Amino acid sequence: MNKKISNRSKNNLESVRLCCANYCNRSTVQGWIHAAVIRKVKQLDLLFSPRPADHDHVKLFEPPYNLVKYDALEVLKLFLYTRPLVFPFVAGGFPALRVLELNSVRLSDSDLVHQFLDRSPLLEDLSFAECFSSSIVDLYISCPNLKTLRIHNDQKMDDYGFHDEDSDDSDVEEDYDEFCKIRGLCKRLKICCPKLVFWEYVGQPAYEVICGNPDALKKAVIYPNAMAQKGRSFKSFGGSMCELFAGVSHVESLSLNHSFIRAIKAARDLNGNFLASLGNLKTLEISTTIDKYAMNVVIRILRCCANLESFHLIIEEEIIAWDKWELEQVLARHLNRVEFLEFNGGEWKLDMACFLLGHGSELEEMVFSWRDKVKYHKQSKKIMKKLVKLNKASSTVKLSNIFC
């Protein structure tokens, strides 16, 4: 490996991907990175779980000095299996870095994030995937040129066999310890990125999120997880989601999930303190159940969308009862696409599908995602023949079966 990377007789390296897991020690991996930098690599993708060094018991990763001072790296992706990331105290930075992806990285404090961002003035794409911290209370993301931001925290700590025991911050509420156990990134998140176009926020949310309402933001995906209300009242969580909702009210494309819908419902009187308008919204995707309380929120959101062009409804779970009258009011004007997840040929979903086809005048596509391979092969064609024969409100609607 050393000879292949460090062979200077060859051209410069476009990219290097090192999948080391815990099979290599830190010095070996650092040596490979050093060799890649000498070959002027533009993209570095590292999957590594550091072993304890001979002189200590700390499983952390510290990039080699020449990487930190390297001025030609454009893409950096690190997957550290929940291990800490630290920087050597040297001057330098990543002046050419455009993409930074941190996956399963333990962040010791907010200064680490600030170092990355301060050293990367051209950064356009930033991702935190299953990153966490036991000590970060306030995380401030400020990037003048950032266009894409993804934050995914949707797994528990023990999914990687890691249990955090270091949290002891007197400024944090007692329930913050519980917050950390479900892979919290921070308690308060503030985003100040004037050129941000796309923002995806999935999993465990912060207690308080300030988006800064960037005018450039066009698309937002907000998918809090089902554990998001743990350690606090659901109404309090809903209040935070309402504030976040207001912060992205100017976007053109918006995706929401069932937990978000529940939180909005729990937080406020829908006929009172609610968004006055989603005037720019053209594309709306909502993944939820079909029941009265969820549909009340969906209907209220749709009433704010004067210029909506596409509405995609993903039906998640089996619900015994649903309100046809309320569905009819919403579908006649808005619904473009409907998808039944984990479909198994059940009567209530077929009944709902028939109803939607009969009233959805704007409906363009209906998809049945089957979960049982045997039932898929046995029933899918028969059900499709039945639906094809129905009188449909939309003459152009497309019906399809998929197995997944």
Image (cartoon, rainbow, N blue to C red):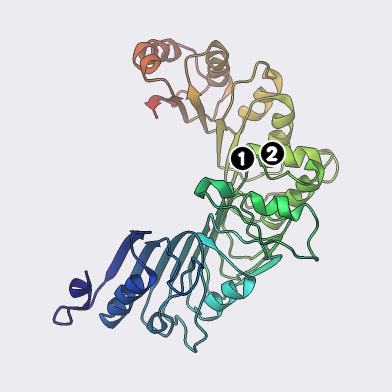
Q: Residue at x 66, y 56 (%)?
A: 250
Question: Which of the image's four quarters has the C terminus?
Answer: top left
Residue 238 screen position, x and y as percent: 76, 45
Residue nearest the viewer, comparing 176 with 222: 176
Question: In the rendered image, which quarter is residue 63 located in?
Answer: bottom left
Query: What secondary structure is marked by label 2?
Result: helix
Front residue of this view, candidates 108 and 235:
108
Rendered image quadrant of residue 71: bottom left
Q: From the viewer's perspective, is residue 338 above or below residue 189?
A: above
| Quadrant where the image shows the N terminus | bottom left
Estimate the spatial distance between the alpha carbons at disc 2 and disc 1, rounded to whole Å.
6 Å
- Mark 1 — residue? 257
Q: Amino acid at mark 1?
A: Asn
Q: Position of residue 367 (x, y in %)?
A: 45, 27
Say if residue 155 shows up in the picture: no
Q: Is disc 1 placed on a helix, strand or loop?
A: loop
In percent of width and height, residue 69 lies at: 42, 85
Residue 372 place in picture, x, y as percent: 41, 20
Say left or right for 183 vs 66.
right
Determine if residue 335 is in view: yes
Q: Residue at label 2?
A: 261
Left or right of 177: which side holds 309?
Answer: left
- Asked if the residues shown at circle 2 and circle 1 are in contact, with their CB atoms under 8 angstroms apart, the answer is yes
Other-residue count near label 1 (Cα within 10 Å), few / some / many at <14 / 14–19 / ≥20: many
Residue at 56% across, 33% down: 313
Residue lying farthest to the front in this orientation: 55
Q: Give the residue type at disc 2.
A: Ile
The single residue placed furthest to the bottom in the displayed view is 91
- Closer to us: 40 or 259: 40
Image quadrant of residue 331?
A: top right
Res. 226 mark: none
Residue 70 to residue 15: above or below: below
